[in-house]
Amino acid sequence: MELRPQFEAFLRDIRPSERNKEEWKRGSNTLRARLLADPDLSPIITNTFLQGSVRRSTAVRPTGGKRSDVDVVIVTTIDYTIEKPTDAMARFEPFLERHYKKKWTQQDRSFGIEMSYVDLDLVITALPNEPKARAILESLYRSQAVETDQSLEERSDWVLNKSWSLSQTNNVLALLAGDSAEWKNDPLMLPDRPIKEWGPTHPLAQIDWAAAKNRRCNGHYINVVRSIKWWRHEHAENLPKYPKGYPLEHMIGYVLPDGITCVAEGIVKAMEGIRDRFSAHFSEGRVPFLPDHGVPSHDVLKRLTVDDFVAFYEEVGKAAELARRALDEVDKDISGELWQKLLGSCFPLPGPSGGDRSRGFSQPVAAAKPKQSDRFA
């Protein structure tokens, strides 16, 4: 059974709380405001924007004392053909020392900032040097579509279009026809300290793809991702460390068909899709190549080992079978127990009148009786 009421309750429980949302918005917006007000850095900053699972609405609530994690991307006019990655990143160290002393660490491609209530990743990027491409992208990256801190769940009408505004209401089709898609061919450049080179990155393309996919899936895609991430959390002891996070999300989006009508159906089809689409890779002992939405030459699963892929694939196969049984089961109690076995105790069991409701009128089996109470006796 689909058990829509139970899935609604389950999703309310595993979503980031309102407090989580307030914390990551407060932390990221403070960082962004400080960057744009900095006298040394602001002249080279075109804008900043949020990316990551909180932006795409695919994050689950933090557990085990962990904090929300949000990425802040800085779009700069740094000339990456001249400036070395280490020098570009060094520009930001005085700023971090002033505002986040003893809270920041340097990572291979970003800076990590650990606050008491949120973890921030500060990602430095550079616009392309070609004048026409730079002019188009500067206009786009300064738009409300880019700089908003609202997630895809908060704004299901969001599209990556410089004409999109926070005041509009669901005029998606008009916007989709409005702007050209030239931005798709011009990724940003990202400094990579270990290899001492700049490489392409396109985080906005990931957000844009997720928004479009969610609409094609009737708003269920992001919750299918959340549910499977929670399944991974509940069964972590039986699963390899990887894939998780964005690589797992990308796998789900890669196999999930459009047009799903509920989360339960989406979970089944995503897990069966992973099992069926990657069966040859499993048999041959090789990891699939999944191109990044923004930079197709990048393999999202590049760091996944064969051993981890094989172990993950085997567990997904078991989960797919269990999910299919739960969906096909006509008894609400048995179906609920199967879904709970798959998704953990956060999935509530149906009550006496729980389960899926009929879409039509049902004839009562007996006359209604007034409820007896001695409250006012």
Image (spheres, grey):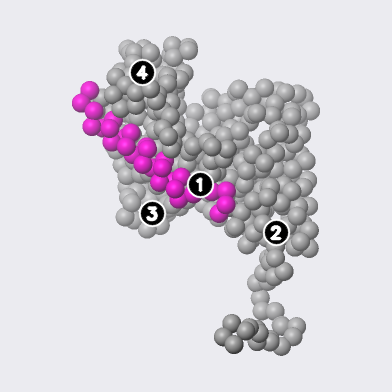
Which element is circle 1 on? loop
Asked if disc 4 and disc 2 are in contact, CB closer than 8 Å, the reply is no
Q: Is residue 206 left or right of residue 42?
A: right
Instruction: Give residue 340's position: percent from left, percent from top.
Output: 71, 51
Quadrant, the N terminus: bottom right
Q: Left or right of 4: which side holds 22?
A: left
Amino acid type indicated by mark 4: Met
Real-space CA distance between mark 1 and mark 3, rounded to the nearest whole angstrom: 32 Å
Q: SS at mark 2?
A: loop
Q: Position of residue 342 (x, y in %)?
A: 72, 47
Q: Which mark is residue 89?
A: 4
The residue to which callout 1 is attached is: 16
Mark pair 4, 3: CA separation = 40 Å
Span colored in magenta:
12-40
Q: Nearer the viewer, mark 1 or mark 4?
A: 1
* Tag 4 secondary structure: helix
Q: CA distance from mark 4 to mark 2?
A: 51 Å
Residue 308 location, x and y as percent? 70, 26
Question: How far apart, in angstroms, are the residues tagged by discs 3 and 2?
Answer: 43 Å
Q: Find disc 2 in the rendering and name its residue.
A: 349
Which numbered dot is residue 174? 3
Q: CA distance from mark 1 to mark 2?
A: 22 Å
Residue 260's place in the image compared with 42, above or below, is below
Q: Nearer the viewer, residue 98 or 42?
A: 98
Q: Earlier in the sequence, mark 1 or mark 4?
A: 1
For image coordinates 46% across by 45% down, the residue present is: 20
